[in-house]
Image (cartoon, rainbow, N blue to C red):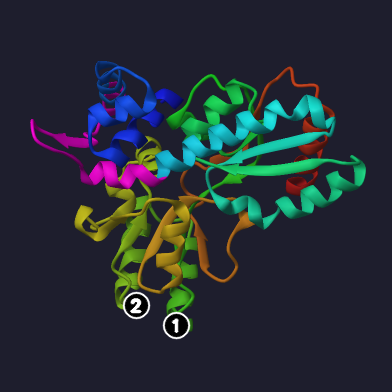
Amino acid sequence: MNSNQLKCFLEVAKELNFAKAAQNLHFSQPSVSKQIQSLEEELKVKLFERNTRSVSLTNAGRLFFPNAKSIYRQELDAIHNLSKLEQEYLPRLLVGSYGMEVFFYMHHIYSKLMQRIPGLQPDVIFAPYQSLSSSLKSNAIDMVIGIKELIEEQSSGIGTFEKLTDAPITYILPENISISARQKLYHVISSDKKTLSGLTAELFNIMEDCNIKRRVTSPVLESAIRSRLNIYELAGRYADENVQYCDNVESAFLQVKAGNAFFIMPQPEKIKNKKLINLPLLSVPSFHYGFYCHHESEKETVQQLKKELQDYFSD
């Protein structure tokens, strides 16, 4: 995915007319059509319905539009910020993350860094891992933080990964579960004699008794868990009709907080949401939480950030 593809997609989505979009962009119409076609092939979805008389966004196109707008805006902002670096002479630190879990701890990290590095200008960019990977490759950002397996699912060859902590696959449940149900859940999850399928079946029986019958997830998480485990073994008898796909992790958490769904995701113990019930599956392999950055990076800000991250997660 590149900026020309995003620019063409956004302009056609705005005008719903290829000729008008090409005119606005000062591109040829075949060039615009080629950019849209290559984007659709890369995403493996159809973004526009088009015939001789009209152009309209497909459901996939409507879903992609806000993400495309955000990614393109972030690329422009990154380029703009980098263009000012030589003039500002102030140390900058740009960290990329897909999920907002960094809000659990990054303020502690930034507080210490700003005490040590006068004039430091830290910032966090939130975007899909594929976009963050491109930004890291082009040195537009300094580091990508997240789940190793999720990042690699979307990207490759983006630098050197350093693990900070384990991220076991965790059942995340609403807090409005009775005390007796909680005791049953903790008893089941702490047993070391259960097979994965047997343990999962018991967990889901308890959840059904609590009228929690829906599993929410995001496509990125689902893909990563599928690559690690048999998702149907993990999800027991919950078939696809019981799964609601959310646009992002935060949206899935919102459904869980509402009290009528549960979530499965890799989650480090240190950054779990203490207002929800967190049940890590210790009987299955953990994912890895950490960061990617350029191996040869010698920026003082990056070296200091790495040290603070390591210290925080080693406590």
Which SS class for mark 2? loop
Callout 2 crowding tier (Cα within 10 Å): few <14, some 14–19, many ≥20: some
Residue drawn 28% across the image and 26% down it: 36
Quote the CA–CA distance across marks 2 and 1. 8 Å
Residue drawn 36% across the image and 67% down it: 261
Callout 1 crowding tier (Cα within 10 Å): few <14, some 14–19, many ≥20: few
The residue at which mark 2 appears reads as 210
Q: Position of residue 50 (x, y in %)?
A: 14, 34
Mark 2 and mark 1 in contact? Answer it, CB < 8 Å: yes
On the rendered structure, is 43 left or right of 152?
A: left
Q: Is residue 306 magenta?
A: no
Which SS class for mark 1? loop
On the rendered structure, is 289 left or right of 111?
A: left
Please name the amino acid that badge 2 sits on.
Cys
Residue drawn 47% across the image and 75% down it: 182
Residue drawn 40% across the image and 30% down it: 7
On the rendered structure, is 199 left or right of 59?
A: right
**Picture quarter containing residue 174?**
bottom left
The residue at which mark 1 appears reads as 178
